[in-house]
Image (spheres, rainbow, N blue to C red):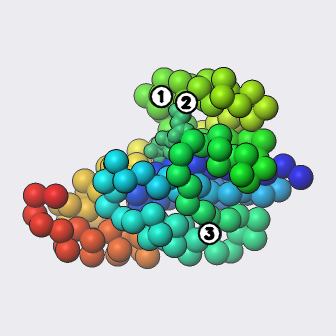
Amino acid sequence: MITAVYPGSFDPATYGHLDVISRASVSFDRVVVGVLNNSAKSPLFSVEERVRMIQYAVRDLANVEVRSFSGLTIGFARECQAKVIVRGLRAVTDFEYELQMAQTNRVLAPDVDTIFLTTSLEYAYVSSTIMKEVARYGGDLSRFAPPQITDALVKRLQELPPHK
Ligand code: PNS
């Protein structure tokens, strides 16, 4: 039984993230999505909100769990008894940061491997940051994330003071 963790900020999750989750759920027996609880990054959504949004989006995937975590990804991997960390790679620009993270995690936990899934081409341009930018200026969000997430995003931005 191979468990994989898929860690990230997911502020909020996009179709790119959901694509990685559903593909990982085919390759691994159990996938635990780990939403990083990092107040230093001042996310738009609380960690509970981010967890709930993903839980709803993956409700049909029986072998996927969604949890929050604090601290190191390898600590979370150990807690979940995972031997694999999954990350998505969109473009070569992601590579340097991802390689550094994977190598750091390998030094910290040589028994846990990082496996990269290349994001499906139709989602290669999608990121939470770009989605938030489009949302701020009232653009069409239908290609970025499911309606439950984009509706929550639009609502959250309306609640914020204009400069945030
Ligand atoms: O979605 P993101 O922001 O690209 O995810 C980054 C994440 C959460 C995977 C990374 O910041 C992380 O692993 N944070 C936990 C702290 C940690 O383990 N650091 C050591 C690896 S660099």
Q: Is mark 2 within 8 Å of ligand 1?
A: yes
Q: Residue at x 10, y 63 (%)?
A: 162
Helix, strand or loop at mark 1: helix
Residue 113 at what x, y percent from top left? 73, 33
Question: What residue is pinned by disc 3?
Answer: 58
Q: Amino acid at mark 2?
A: Met
Q: Is mark 1 within 8 Å of ligand 1?
A: yes
Q: Give the mark, 3 or 1, whose residue is nearer the N terminus.
A: 3
Residue 137 at what x, y percent from top left? 17, 60
Question: What residue is pinned by disc 1?
Answer: 97
- Position of 126 with respect to 44 (left or right) is right
- Looking at the image, is 115 positioned above or below residue 122? above
Residue 85 sits in quarter: top right
Front: mark 3 or 1: 1
Q: Is residue 153 visible?
A: yes
Q: Residue at x 20, y 65 (%)?
A: 138
Helix, strand or loop at mark 3: loop
Q: Is residue 146 visible?
A: no
For this rendering, which residue is in front, 14 or 38?
38
Dot 1, crowdedness within 10 Å: few (<14), some or many (≥20)? few
Dot 2, crowdedness within 10 Å: few (<14), some or many (≥20)? some
Question: What residue is pinned by disc 2?
Answer: 101
Q: Amino acid at mark 3?
A: Val
Q: Which mark is residue 30?
A: none
- Between the C-alphas of marks 1 and 2, the distance is 6 Å
